[in-house]
């Protein structure tokens, strides 16, 4: 990509606080962005060829939104935890296997999108993120939902298209969880914790494409209670 094009992008970003450069085949995070650490609020470098982020990513103190979909990232630097104002982190379509332990310091984070990566277990430490509303881990390699899931403060967890065959009943203890998506996994009917139906806040429980007919859930204890929540939510938004 020509220097003049990058220069004009940088000049615009200086004024707007937004830097967007997608689908340009960038092999690395543009060094020139260092000059904008003080005022950048939004960065979108999707559809490039980034394999890593520099530690200097932690210097973007004003950053609210970081979108790096469809790159070649295998992980994140620990310095990502310095982004105290970050509200949206979108990393779908990369090669990430695990998250750094510093993720738990992203206290402003509301949306974390990790769809289509190489993650094999539910990331730990995200329970500290009190404002996290959406956690998208669809299209990964997760096989079970562990008891630690109860620590999450999220409103929605998307685990569609994983390899989940085991769900801890503790998922029903997530205090704010309203939407749980488990479509196209490896669940048997007997693996559905009845606590989700009977005791949780979940009002949309999506399980199409597993190893049982969805309508057979109607016979489970607590299904009526779940349907009450489902119907009440539908009415509220209709």
Image (cartoon, helix red, strand yellow):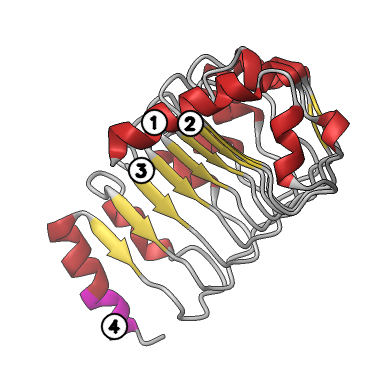
Confirm or deny contact between disc 1 and disc 2 (CB under 8 A).
yes
Q: Is residue 230 inside the magenta stretch? A: no
Q: Look at the image and give the residue range highlighted in magenta.
A: 3-8
Left or right, residue 21 beside residue 93: left
In the picture, which quadrant includes the C terminus? Answer: top left
- Between 71 and 149, the residue placed more toward the observer is 149
Q: CA distance from mark 2 to mark 3?
A: 41 Å
The answer to whether 100 appears left or right of 133 in the picture is right
Magenta region, main secondary structure: helix
Residue 230's mark? 2
Q: Position of residue 54 (x, y in %)?
A: 54, 52
Decide if residue 122 is in sight here: no
Callout 2 touching callout 3 (CB < 8 Å): no
Residue at left 64%, top 63%?
A: 51
Q: Which residue is mark 1?
A: 233
Q: Is residue 152 visible?
A: yes
Q: Earlier in the sequence, mark 2 or mark 3?
A: 3
Q: CA distance from mark 3 to mark 1?
A: 39 Å
Give me the C-alpha separation between circle 4 and circle 1: 49 Å
Q: Is residue 66 above or below residue 127?
A: below
Q: Position of residue 211 (x, y in %)?
A: 85, 48
Which residue occupies 33% across, 82% down?
A: 3
Distance Cα–Cα, label 4 vs label 2 = 51 Å
| Relative depth, front residue between 151 and 51 | 151
Q: Earlier in the sequence, mark 4 or mark 3?
A: 4
Q: Is residue 36 above or below residue 176?
A: below
Pointers 3 and 1 in contact (C-beta within 8 Å): no
Q: Earlier in the sequence, mark 4 or mark 1?
A: 4
For mark 4, what is the residue?
Answer: 5
What residue does disc 3 label? 60
């Amino acid at each position: 990509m020509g220097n003049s094009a990058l220069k004009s992008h940088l000049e615009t970003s200086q004024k707007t606080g937004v830097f967007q450069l997608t689908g340009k085949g960038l092999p690395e995070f543009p060094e020139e962005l260092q000059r904008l650490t003080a005022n950048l609020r939004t960065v979108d470098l999707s559809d490039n060829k980034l394999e890593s982020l520099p530690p200097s990513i932690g210097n973007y103190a004003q950053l609210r939104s970081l979108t790096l979909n469809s790159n070649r990232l295998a992980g994140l630097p620990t310095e990502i935890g310095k982004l105290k104002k970050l509200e949206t982190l979108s990393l779908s379509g990369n090669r990430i296997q695990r998250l750094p332990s510093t993720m738990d310091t992203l206290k402003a984070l509301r949306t974390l999108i990790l769809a289509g990566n190489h993650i094999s277990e539910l990331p730990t430490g995200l329970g500290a993120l009190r404002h996290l509303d959406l956690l998208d881990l669809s299209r990964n390699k997760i096989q079970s939902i562990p008891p630690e899931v109860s620590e999450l403060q999220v409103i929605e967890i998307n685990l569609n298209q994983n390899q989940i065959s085991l769900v801890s009943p503790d998922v029903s203890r997530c205090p704010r969880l309203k939407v749980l998506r488990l479509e196209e996994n490896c669940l048997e009917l007997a693996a559905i914790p009845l606590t989700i139906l009977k005791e949780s806040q979940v009002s949309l429980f999506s399980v199409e494409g597993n190893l049982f007919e969805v309508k057979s859930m109607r016979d489970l204890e607590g299904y009526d209670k779940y349907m009450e929540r489902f119907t009440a939510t539908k009415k509220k938004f209709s």
